[in-house]
Image: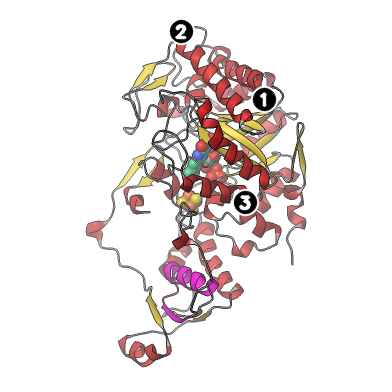
Amino acid sequence: MTQTAPLARLFEPARWGKLHSKNRIKYGSCCVSNYNNRDGTHTIREHARTQVIAQTGCGIITNQGAYPDPLGEGKGYFRQVAIYDDKCIPEFEKIAGYIHDAGAIAVQQVLHAGRYGGIDLGYCLQPSIVPQTLPHFRPPREITKEQIRATVQQHAEAARRALKAGFDATEVTSFMGYLLATFNSKFTNRRTDEYGGSLKNRGRFMCELIDAMKQAQGDAPLVIRLNGNELMDRWGGNTEDECFELMQLAAEHGVDMISVTVGWQEAPESSIGRDVPPGYWRRLAARAKKMLPNTPIAFGNRLPDPHMASKCIEQGEFDFWEVCRPMLADPELVHKAAAGRMGEVKRCIGSLNCLSRLFRDLPYTCTRNPQLGHEYDPAYQITPAVMPKKIMVIGAGPAGMECAITAKRRGHDVIVFERGPGIGGALAGYARNDLANSDDLTSVVAYYRNMAEALNIEVRCNTSIDVKAMRSMLHQYDVAVIATGARIDARFLPECTPVRGWWCWAGARSG
Ligand SMILES: Cc1cc2nc3c(=O)[nH]c(=O)nc-3n(C[C@H](O)[C@H](O)[C@H](O)COP(=O)(O)O)c2cc1C
Ligand code: SF4
């Protein structure tokens, strides 16, 4: 049975200005991957990853935020890509090509990290000197008016380059407290000139950026990412009402889409972690849509469910479902949803392993998707086995089931032995008692059950395999995989440190 009918709104073609999108799904800029070279040039690893992104089935695809200045003041991540010079254009041409070949609209994001930038320098740029609240970031320097003018120009030049490379549209981000957000926010903008003070003055930099980028790119659309709520009350940030006034201002300056986001890196409150119920922030998108009925609104923060997204679109809460992490966890999400195979989706569980690694200057990985970042690596491709084998897997927890699924897909004959009554191992018990969103972890267990059924993997429950049983059975198998779980040794427990509002585990390093 196909589930396309309930997803009809999500999969309907949509007009976006003069552009046509094959559906209402926007791949959110979720690609600052740390896979590139330190000088901002692309790698084979990044291209392989981007080819997978292009094939996700989204109607609009936003390429990762590129920094626009040659000094790297806008560079927020060790291996972030750069778009500060025409010499960058050929690599971006390839990326626009992948996206177009897949029939999607290509959007290039410009990301000047501002307060979180200057990663290779001994300082960062901000409207005013407001000390960092998190130790990872560089000490602030106040941006001069001359630098403001140069930065606006750099954004315009970046937009021009993106268009020249073949992109259909551009995007500027204030996500999580980058340069644009620091001008908009009362917390970081304490200037006394025309760029500070009143909301109109604080928004001046944003308006200048919009005007300059739009002028540079002609009638190609411009998206702006703006906070619906900064979650920065404790630090004296903007109120929610102020955030919406800023959206209004952006709309008056003719932006072609507003992507509504939530929170800053250093917000004390969680915005997209596992403790936030899916769909929790959709009210912000709905408020934006109500206020700006003629401006396309994109939204998706911590909204991993396409059915919920389709319903929101139907109810007029937003126009485009903007997805990031759910497609890191499962790049096939859109195709599986369209085919009514939601039970086979690896759902993003909000663990934030991906982001926490970026802030440790490591390439991102995903708790659920071991292939993420290894798209270029033949060892990670699921290819038919040269010689099919008979494999016994002991333990039906996540490790055992991942192994069984991969082996089965490669054409091996697999039987899983499980001591307990069902699939899931220790995770199943933990999921039942989860104090956050039990849906997240129970979905992992359900996925393994569904995949066992879909791939016809035999799982023998209530079957203990001890040494004696092994000896009596081994001759029947070519390979035995022991996946009986681990015991936690408290001496080696990772330290849990509060890093930038999202709780990041030091242990996530080993990802
Ligand atoms: C690994 C990773 C990289 C991201 N890179 C960007 C980026 O380059 N630009 C941006 O505006 N947001 C970026 N984001 C934020 C996402 O676009 C998105 O707003 C956020 O993850 C919440 O949406 P989700 O719940 O669908 O993941 C990134 C997020 C993650 C997890
Ligand atoms: S690491 Fe966690 S939060 Fe990030 S995409 Fe994977 S499951 Fe989602």
Is residue 273 in view from this perspective? no
Q: First in sequence: mark 1 or mark 2?
A: 2
Depth-wise, is mark 3 or mark 2 nearer the camera?
3
Q: Depth check: give the residue in front, 392 or 412.
A: 412
Please indicate whether residue 436 sits to the left or right of residue 306 in the image. Answer: left
Q: Distance between the Cα atoms at labels 3 and 1?
A: 26 Å
Quarter of image, res 15: top right
Q: Depth check: give the residue in front, 99 or 10.
A: 99
Secondary structure, mark 2, is: loop
Q: Residue at x 50, y 11 (%)?
A: 197
**From what the image shows, is residue 172 above or below residue 475?**
above
- Place of residue 442 in the rendered image (x, y in percent of width and height, measured from the top left): 52, 63
Secondary structure, mark 1, is: loop
What residue is disc 2 on?
A: 192
Q: Residue at x 44, y 23 (%)?
A: 70
Q: Is residue 69 magenta?
A: no
Q: First in sequence: mark 3 or mark 1?
A: 3
- Place of residue 8 in the rendered image (x, y in percent of width and height, measured from the top left): 77, 52
Give the position of the N terminus as an image quadrant. bottom right
Give me the disc on residue 255. 1
| Region rendered in magenta | 389-410
Q: Residue at x 34, y 53 (%)?
A: 510
Depth-wise, is mark 3 or mark 1 nearer the camera?
3
Quarter of image, res 420: bottom left
